[in-house]
Image: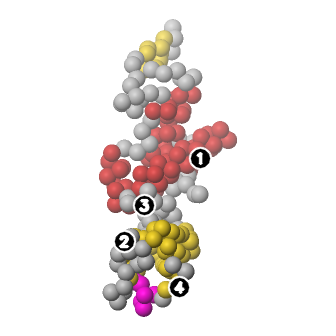
Amino acid sequence: MADFCSADDIATFLQVSIATAAQIAAADRACAEAAAAIRNYTHQYLELVEDEAITLDSRGGARIFLPELPVVEVSAVVEDDTALDVDDDYKLGQHGILHRVGGAKWAKGIQIIAVTYSHGYATLPDDIVVIATRAASRAYQSGLRAAEDEASLGVQSKSLGDFSVQYGNESVADGLMGASGVRLLLLSEKDVLDNYRI
């Protein structure tokens, strides 16, 4: 499973150097977390997957919805152990909908329709890469802050001369409770991701 951005993307976005093994590992982890958050929010894998074989339940209507979008190609459909022919028995419509043709209905049953299809993006859309980079950058920065504060919660400011540390309250509700409380996806980013969400 690949990530939607890289350590280099974070470095470019934050205008910092990510060069040591520890920095690269932290950035890679942040990228993986951002990709997982985007996949979880959209309920989609998003990257290109070729010839995935799935088995679906059917209520017996004229349409079946394939779970991953965009659908690139449907290479095989088997209904109740009978292979179906494209155009004669079914057609792929918009939004990953398989339509039965000629007035026929899909067989009704549990795990009765087997589909082999390709789905996702060969090249991820720019807005997904941008959101992944921003989310990963927030996670990376949060880790840096936690390391700098030695994982102490509530550090608001530090001084150097006659060293002092000022603490304040942090709230889970505000998404500020240490590195673990950082928001991976902002509402504005979710608004954009809604275009890819099922």
Identify the element where label 2 is drawn: helix
Residue 15 position, x and y percent, is 49, 43
The amino acid sitting under disc 4 is Ala
Q: Earlier in the sequence, mark 3 or mark 1?
A: 1
Residue 91 position, x and y percent, is 40, 83
Residue 90: within the magenta?
yes
Compared to 37, does 85 lie above or below? below
Colouring mode (rainbow / by chain / secondary structure / one colour): secondary structure
CA distance separating discs 3 and 2 = 20 Å
Q: Which residues are magenta?
A: 86-91
Residue ID for mark 2: 95
CA distance separating discs 2 and 4 = 23 Å
Residue 178 horizontal side relative to residue 104, left or right: right
Seen at 45% across and 71% down, the residue is 109
Q: Earlier in the sequence, mark 3 or mark 2?
A: 2
Residue ID for mark 1: 28
Compared to 45, does 19 lie above or below? above
Q: Quadrant of the C terminus?
A: bottom left
Residue 194: within the magenta?
no
The amino acid sitting under disc 1 is Asp
